[in-house]
Image (spheres, coloured by chain):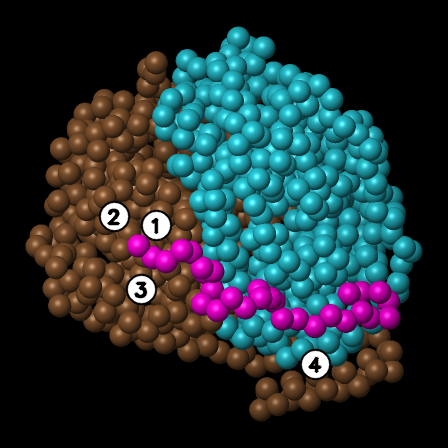
């Protein structure tokens, strides 16, 4: 009934405008009833060799996204060879089948497709994005990249030098220093989310290591496909069978990533960046798993704290005080326990004041208003269809669903799940997952200008770290 | 092997974003495009004003003004622009370039009226809610935006330095869009009033609505919200003094960086004018992908550069072609420059191969296909074509420019525009390492 009412209201207003009267601006217009969106179920089938394929059709624009995903990633790097998974992904882009690196790249560019290998902490993937009209040719290339990478030693020499230089360049970036230090302090320096390749670990990686990692990881038993786009199930099944049907062997690879220990106490870690006109700030603690029943409450709590433009942190730091271009917060959800983080880059001379405001907001989030609850719930729930407008957006959402083994009806129950949250649930999430008394605080800026003010806040013990303690020594490069 | 490359699209139909154009009595141009993929809609307004319209000593003002547009209007309290949109599941943002200022909302289609209310209210009644305090607030935010992207970012000072030296004093592209700190400090409440009255009238704006809409109903909604806003004075667009970059201007800036970086900037044609597509393709032939000439030489073979890029940046009043390369440790920028000059020299004499050109054209076609999936991108394309090509339906013409190119066109344009004696050469080097700069 509401929808019908709104509809007639619309007609009435139109009639008014015909006689050039002014619109009624005394209150914002009432929206019509939401139109809703039913996301089709993600289908599954297996190829004859047992490899699983997740499939979702999306018509409209004739292109397709296909990803091969394999268990195992940088978390599996041996301590002495950190960088191995990333090196393997890089080298899979550098020549396959009867094409060397330049020939492969030429063919990919000529087809106008994207074909790229990646390494994440717990997963290796090869992603293809292609117009439907080029599907056969691009799947042939994808087969070569997945099944027949060449792993040429000269290509690894190139990539190794490029990676060493990139390590050096990280020392230029205050935000990289801040985020790296933060991860080290939350997870511990040797944890997969915190550790970094170094000159010695990169130089320690041989082509044989890369081939070994590939052979163990990119196997039929350890991989699956994700297909989203304008192609029928029968068509893509036949095309994948034709190219990957004989792919056999391997075992499911285990990825063990330890959970960070609970963050206790509050220590401030300062890194000097002389001359910096802004200070990079990070506040946070160990978080929670994606499959927690509190996930929806955490999402909405974070929307209110720092997950939207109207959030408290952005309003306070940017709009009320003008200390920064913006401020935000978020939770990371890897397969293991992730973290909570709030961050900003604030003007050097107000660093202490900005830190103080952050601490206030991190404390006050335990009390929220009904208005905030309604707005945040609506923001997350009513805008949800935007996640399903493009092949890429759909693929990202389906990928998350597979990674975290979310229920089959996840997409279609998301909106009611969000709208059902109560203020009490959201406040409880704040109390449980945002604890300003037990936090890591990182500041990267000009210590000669910010240190005295920060000390005067008396927020806890202060430890000064050097850039080199965080990022390691700058590689010696010739 | 697949057969010689035919179009990416199954049938070679003309590319098009179907739409309807209306003009309201007050001069507001309205363009509607229907896309029912998801129940969302994008409302996008372009005002034809940007940093090139700014007065002397008020650089950065067009962008500062953009910020102020989100701070409430006659019937929208400060903060409510975002509060109201978020409460219906919407997102919004804005951006400023040299030639235009853009505002958009993406929201569930059932709440379209709210976006129209908000956009019309700030177009019609911004000044009713304006105050010096709001100007001060956003001034601080914008200064921090500048700190974040210019002063505190490695190589962040490059753009400003190149613009100042590339365009003569008095040319409307002579300063950065973000503006200078002193000018941001000087911007006053009175400036806001004057700027709004001059440039933020419906006759200087274009409204695009793309998404889950019914065009006939939607235009009635638009009239309802926008008809009452009076037409403003005719806006005169800035003109550029005729100028030719003469000689090679060499500049060196020291920065907090590990590696030196070289920038070469050349004067090229304006957006969508003859030569623009040629230089766009030349940029990709030179520096996109492993087989591009500069990447292959500098990064892949010689391994003396960490990266290299090139692009043609066409704007309304002219274009700039930029080549950028970061040196590996121990390499002087002079060495990079001589290889770049050698490769550009070759391109000016011998046309690229058919395959090199086709590679670029095919990638452009795939990119268009990707953009066609998003209402937001389509709204932006309609705006850009309307403003800079005079016709919102210019997509097919745009792509046809590329398809029609012969390899000899690329070398002819490269010869005409990439003259080593007419350019700005900027070296950004680590502190105390001026010897690494181009001498």
Q: Is residue B86 left or right of residue B359?
A: right
Above or below for B168 versus A315: above
Image position, residue B339 (x, y; %): 49, 21
Secondary element type, mark 4: helix
Q: CA distance from mark 2 to mark 1?
A: 9 Å
Are discs 3 and 1 less than 8 Å apart at CB? no
Q: Which chain is brown?
A: A
Q: Chain of mark 3?
A: A
Residue B89 as seen in the image, left or right of residue B60 = left
The answer for how far apart the CA atoms under marks 3 and 4 are is 37 Å
Between disc 2 and disc 3, the foreground one is 2
Name the residue at 21% across, 39% down: A150
Residue designated by label 1: A115
Q: Which residue is label 3 attached to?
A: A227
- SS at mark 3? strand
Q: Are marks 2 and 1 in contact (CB under 8 Å)?
A: yes
Q: Which residue is mark 2?
A: A145
Image: magenta residue range: B1-29
Instruction: Give the spatial CA distance, label 4 vs label 2.
Output: 50 Å
Lower position in the chain sequence, tag 2 or tag 3: 2
What's the mark number on residue B216?
4
Give the structural element (helix, strand or loop) at label 1.
strand
Q: Nearer the viewer, residue A262 or A74?
A: A74
Q: Residue B57, position in %: x, y? A: 82, 31
Q: Are marks 2 and 3 on the same chain?
A: yes
| In contact (CB < 8 Å): disc 2 and disc 3 | no
Disc on res. B348: none
């Amino acid at each position: 009934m509401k929808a019908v009412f709104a509809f007639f209201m619309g007609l009435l207003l139109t009639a008014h405008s015909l006689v050039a009267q002014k619109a009624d601006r005394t209150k914002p217009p009432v929206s019509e009833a939401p139109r809703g969106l039913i996301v089709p179920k993600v289908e599954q089938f297996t190829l004859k060799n047992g490899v699983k394929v997740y499939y979702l059709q999306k018509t409209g624009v004739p292109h397709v996204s296909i990803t091969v995903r394999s268990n195992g990633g940088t978390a599996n790097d041996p301590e002495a060879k950190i960088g191995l998974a990333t090196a393997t992904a890089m080298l899979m882009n550098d020549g396959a089948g009867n094409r060397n690196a330049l020939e492969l790249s030429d063919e990919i560019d000529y087809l106008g497709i994207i074909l790229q290998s990646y390494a994440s902490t717990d997963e290796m993937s090869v992603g293809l994005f292609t117009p439907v009209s080029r599907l056969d040719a691009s799947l042939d290339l994808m087969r070569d990249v997945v099944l027949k990478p060449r792993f040429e030693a000269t290509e690894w020499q190139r990539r190794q030098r490029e990676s060493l230089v990139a390590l050096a360049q990280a020392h230029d970036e205050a935000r990289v220093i801040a985020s790296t230090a933060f991860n080290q302090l939350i997870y511990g320096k040797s944890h997969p989310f915190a550790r970094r390749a170094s000159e010695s670990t990169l130089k320690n990686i041989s082509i044989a290591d890369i081939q070994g990692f590939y052979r163990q990881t990119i196997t039929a038993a350890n991989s699956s496909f994700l297909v989203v786009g304008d192609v029928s199930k029968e068509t893509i099944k036949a095309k994948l069978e034709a190219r990957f049907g004989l792919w056999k062997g391997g075992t499911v690879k285990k990825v063990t990533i330890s959970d960070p220990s609970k963050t206790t106490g509050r220590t401030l870690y300062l890194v000097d960046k002389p001359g910096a006109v802004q200070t990079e700030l990070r506040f946070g603690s160990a978080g929670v798993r994606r499959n927690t029943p509190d996930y929806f409450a955490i999402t909405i709590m974070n929307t209110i704290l720092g997950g939207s433009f109207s959030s408290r942190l952005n309003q306070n730091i940017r709009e009320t005080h003008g200390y920064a271009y913006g401020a935000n917060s978020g939770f990371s959800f890897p397969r293991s326990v992730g973290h909570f983080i709030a961050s900003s880059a604030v003007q050097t001379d107000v660093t202490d004041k900005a830190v103080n405001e952050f601490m206030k907001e991190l404390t006050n989030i335990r009390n929220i208003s009904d208005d905030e609850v309604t707005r945040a719930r609506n923001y997350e729930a009513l805008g949800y269809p935007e996640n399903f407008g493009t092949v890429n957006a759909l693929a990202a959402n389906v990928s998350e669903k597979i990674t975290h083994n979310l229920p089959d009806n996840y997409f279609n129950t998301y909106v009611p799940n969000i709208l059902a949250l109560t203020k009490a649930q959201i406040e409880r999430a704040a109390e449980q997952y945002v604890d300003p008394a037990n936090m890591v605080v990182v500041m990267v800026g000009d210590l000669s200008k910010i240190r005295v003010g920060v000390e005067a806040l008396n927020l806890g013990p202060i430890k000064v770290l050097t850039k080199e303690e965080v990022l390691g020594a700058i590689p010696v490069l010739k | 092997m697949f057969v010689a490359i035919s179009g990416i699209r199954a049938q070679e139909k003309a590319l098009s974003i179907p739409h309807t154009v209306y003009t309201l009595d007050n001069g507001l141009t309205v363009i509607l495009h229907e896309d029912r993929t998801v129940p969302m809609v994008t409302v996008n307004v372009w005002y034809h004003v940007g940093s090139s319209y700014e007065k002397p000593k008020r650089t950065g003002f067009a962008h500062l003004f953009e910020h102020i547009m989100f701070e409430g209007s006659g019937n929208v309290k400060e903060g409510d622009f975002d509060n109201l949109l978020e409460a219906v599941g919407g997102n919004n943002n804005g951006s400023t370039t040299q030639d235009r200022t853009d505002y958009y909302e993406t929201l569930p289609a059932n709440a379209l009226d709210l976006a129209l209310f908000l956009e019309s209210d700030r177009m019609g009644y911004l000044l009713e809610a304006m105050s010096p305090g709001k100007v001060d607030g956003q001034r601080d935010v914008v200064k921090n935006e500048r700190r974040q992207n210019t002063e505190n970012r490695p190589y962040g000072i490059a753009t400003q330095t190149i613009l100042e030296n590339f365009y003569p004093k008095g040319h409307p592209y002579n300063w950065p869009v973000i503006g200078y700190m002193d000018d941001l400090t000087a911007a006053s409440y009175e400036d806001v009033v004057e700027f709004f009255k001059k440039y933020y009238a419906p006759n200087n704006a274009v409204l695009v609505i793309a998404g889950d809409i019914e065009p006939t109903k939607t235009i009635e909604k638009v009239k309802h919200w926008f008809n009452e806003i009076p037409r403003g004075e005719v806006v005169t667009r800035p003109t550029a003094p005729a100028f030719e970059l003469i000689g090679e201007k060499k500049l060196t800036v020291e920065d907090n960086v590990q590696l030196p970086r070289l920038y070469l900037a050349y004067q090229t044609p304006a957006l969508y004018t003859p030569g623009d597509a040629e230089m766009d393709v030349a940029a990709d032939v030179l520096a996109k992908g492993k087989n591009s000439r500069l990447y292959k030489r500098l990064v892949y073979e010689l391994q003396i550069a960490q990266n290299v890029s090139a692009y043609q940046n066409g704007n309304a009043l002219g274009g700039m072609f930029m080549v950028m390369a970061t040196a590996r440790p121990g390499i002087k920028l002079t060495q990079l420059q001589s290889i770049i000059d050698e490769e550009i020299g070759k391109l000016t004499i011998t046309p690229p191969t058919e395959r090199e050109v086709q590679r670029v054209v095919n990638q452009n076609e795939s990119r268009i296909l990707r953009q066609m999936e998003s209402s937001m991108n389509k709204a932006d394309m309609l705006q850009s074509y309307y403003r800079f090509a005079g016709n919102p339906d210019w997509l097919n013409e745009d792509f046809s420019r590329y398809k029609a190119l012969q390899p000899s066109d690329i070398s002819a344009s490269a010869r005409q525009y990439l003259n080593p004696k007419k350019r700005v050469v900027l070296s950004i080097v680590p502190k105390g390492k001026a010897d690494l700069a181009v001498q």
